[in-house]
Image (cartoon, rainbow, N blue to C red):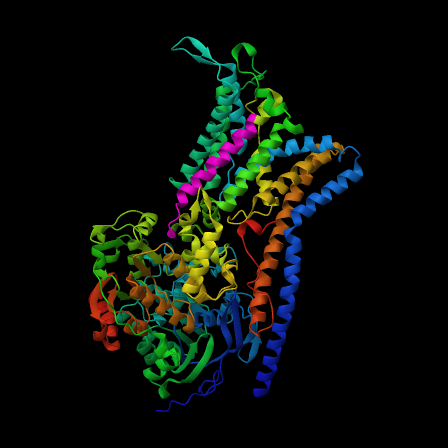
Amino acid sequence: MTTTTPRPGITTAPVAPVLRAVDVTKVYGGTQALKGVSLDIAPGRVTVLFGENGAGKSTLMKILSAVESPTTGYVELDGQVVEFGSARDAADRGISIIHQELSLCPNLSIQDNLFLGRERTRGGVLVDGSTERALATTVLRRLDEALDPDQPVGELRLGQQQLVEIARALLQKARILIMDEPTSALSAPEVETLFQVIRELTGQGVAIVYISHHLEEALDIADDVAVLRDGSMVAAAAAADVDLAWVVRKMVGREQDELFPVRDPHLGPVVLETIELSVADAANPDRLAVDGVSLSVRAGETVGIYGLMGSGRTELLECLAGRLHADSGQVLMHGGTLTGNVRQRIRAGLALVPEDRQRDGLVQTMSVGQNLSLAALTMFVRRLFVNRSRERAAVESMISDVTVKTAGPDAPIGSLSGGNQQKVVIGKALMTGPRVLLLDEPSRGVDVAAKADVFKLMAEQAERGLAVLFTTSETEEALRIPDRLLVLVRGRLVADLRAGEITRDRLMSLADGADTTEEA
Amino acid sequence: MTDTLTHDHATVLEQRRQAAAEARRLKTLNSIFELRAFIALGVLIIVFSLLSDSFLTVDNLITMTKHVAINGILALGMLLVILKGGIDLSVGSIVGLSGVVAGELLKGVRLSLFGVIAYPPVWAVVILCIAVGAVVGTVNGILVTRLNVAPFIATLGMLYVARGAALLISGGTTYPNLAGQPSTHNTGFDWIGGGRPLGLPVAIWIMVILVAVVAVLLRSTPFGRWLYATGGNERATELTGVPVKRVKTIVYMISGACAAMSGIIIASELTSAAPQAGDSFELNAIAAVVIGGAALSGGRGNVRGTLVGAFVIGFLADGLVILGVSTFWQIFIKGTVIIVAVILDQSQQRFQRRGAAASAVAIATNEPTDLGATKVRPEDTAP
């Protein structure tokens, strides 16, 4: 096995690339998501893109599928520089993307979804149902799936919905199919079906671009691999030439050892405890998003929850924070029952750093300082008014505590990089003086350096006696950061492991094994 | 291959250099656009004083400002509602309702239990009217926060309910002679509309005081900060532990109270109260807030801008009357001004975004730019 790294941007594919990204840069606000990335996609092959959260994978996918246009650089299709007007334009030219969150209308039938926005018509007015039916049947047969085109999509299992998305792409004569985390919500048999479909498609000459958190699984299906780190393409090779260790090394980079703080935890009493906590799934009320979870976190302890998308990790934390209502079970803090809304729980000493910081964490119209002090504003009030100098002093000291790189408290929040924005959200939570810090995917959309800072911050807070509970979908993080790791699969806790007992294989089999039993 | 790459890198570098220049240009343009409402007001004053000798006189300015005050007070309440991302269509009707309540109270309240007619003093009348406005506003707030009715619909409903109430109470007729009678000790109501302490009409003083109060509320209290945050990102603000529902209810309450105050001023000026008073005033108030640079989506806007917006609307209307322009043209021109104001606001937003993006591109090459040095305070971004 060779581990030599070919020059970034040039894969070892023997055929001419069908799609190329050349020296692509993408800037969002003050963040450089991609820094001169080049990638070749070969027809009839599966190109797997590896990279941690925030490495720029999704941004690159969006540029390849014309959901976003590059700030600098360009995209080549069949050797021609192309500028797509829209994602639809790109789809018309054979590039389709299947997002992590599926974009189907649950109230419409499979057939209606397949032709949505591209209805076959008679004379341009009436929908031609029989032509649509014939095409739908053909394409569904091509995917080996016995699905009734009249069935509403909402009744399908997630894996089947995913196949409908693929069928839609095929109907648009997709030659390049981009799949963002296609297996994250699938059970093991469903993954098997998906892989068969992928192999058939590559056999028909379709180029597949594939992103996944399941490294082994993705490496299984890969023909070519490319690794992104901090917005740069750090390595590309044929899958046959590399192994898992190589991928991990390239993904995490030289900072690997500095990334994860070494801790010698001093555990105090149990601070936060849940007893048989259940939360209904908002999208699907018959299902439980969190299903009878009992856990406890002690003072000075960092507890990780390993869970993929749809595992209920977000619902669990949001329920603890008071945003979601628990359907049954109890939350205890210092042994007493914890109830009330978000505000009351913050007062009780519970602070949440939400997963989606743009949507749930930050107010984009406000400055860095105003975002930081928002939760704790009443602490600075003297006789009705906010005491600006006290507020500013506290904000400035928090900026240095959580090491936010900013021009100052008055800088617009949008001028900060993803990592620094994340530190602001953490700082905001810390300003309320919590006893328990909840962090939902704290490393999401954060570069490697800031990631290390975030983990260090979590460790520091634990040293100070806080109970830290965080979620992650990164195996590497799950293995190395927490003092104790809980594995959450489909709303259920399937394992509670001490730091020493966790291995990558065990984690993978736990996540997958529970999946199959659930299905069966 | 290598050649193309080198060439491409050179292109990228050039793109970045251009981005830095672009960022600087956009920043200048942006600062000019931020002053657009002031510039518009200046242009109005200059044009009208050139066209008419009677425009730029102290007396006329005071008269016009008195007119501005009525809309200005409404607009201050409306600003708060718009900052949180809502809208209040009911204020015009509250103006009418408030006048009717004043008329009813000054006429005397028959207390059948004691067989007497009570004449509440003027201060009590004012407080009760404002309370009525605040209650109507609070109902708006409860509809929006607790019953999840969209602000547009909730306040549209209250527009009819409040107007209907005004018509029901008054029986559709106007209350005349609100000056009160010495025999019943309720004189002085006309002072609010006609008095001139220190040479300025009471209405202007009320507006000045409210401007100061609202400005302090927005700038220096947690409530003000919470309001901007709610308008900027309600979800995140709620997750931060801010009592978002309370903030939202209070802004509707204040808006209702402001509308009631305007209603009192109008009734007092005319010394009569008509149930139809204040018809479509909500639209003038919204126009003032929007011309003042507030975003209807919430989170952006300030008192200064809204005040200038109210002056633009008021001076434009009065100036056109002085010039003898037909009423039909007045309406037409007002509409045009509102649309132009919003278009300018959109372009300023675009400059700001493009400026930020250009700075970020430029920074990739370590070009000296002043990204991040720009200070932002939501209350300072407009006009």
- Number of disc labels: 0
Above-or-below relation of B68 to B272: below
Tell me, yes or no, whether the highlighted magenta stretch contains residue B249.
yes
Q: Which residues are magenta?
A: B239-264
In the rendered view of the protein, which quadrant contains the N terminus of chain B?
bottom right
Image quarter for residue A116? bottom left
Residue B314 screen position, x and y as percent: 66, 36
Dominant secondary-structure state across the stretch colored magenta? helix
Above-or-below relation of A517 to A255: above
Above-or-below relation of B50 to B20: above
Image quarter for residue B208? top right
Looking at the image, the residue that sits furthest to the top is B115
Q: Between residues A159 and B360, which one lies in front from this camera angle?
A: B360
Residue B186 screen position, x and y as percent: 53, 16
Q: Between residues A107 and A508, which one lies in front from this camera angle?
A: A508
Tell me, yes or no, whether the highlighted magenta stretch contains residue A185.
no
Residue B61 screen position, x and y as percent: 71, 34
Q: Between residues A287 and A366, which one lies in front from this camera angle?
A: A366
| Residue name at image x 23 percent, y 72 percent | A499
| Residue name at image x 46 percent, y 79 percent | A233
Looking at the image, the residue that sits furthest to the bottom is A1
Q: Between residues A341 and B282, which one lies in front from this camera angle?
A: A341
**Would residue A161 be visible to someone looking at this image?**
yes
In this picture, residue B262 sits left or right of residue A10 = right
Residue A56 screen position, x and y as percent: 45, 72
In this picture, residue B247 sits left or right of residue B365 = left
**Would residue A356 be visible to someone looking at this image?**
no
In this picture, residue B241 sits left or right of residue B218 = left
In this picture, residue A305 sits left or right of residue A211 = left
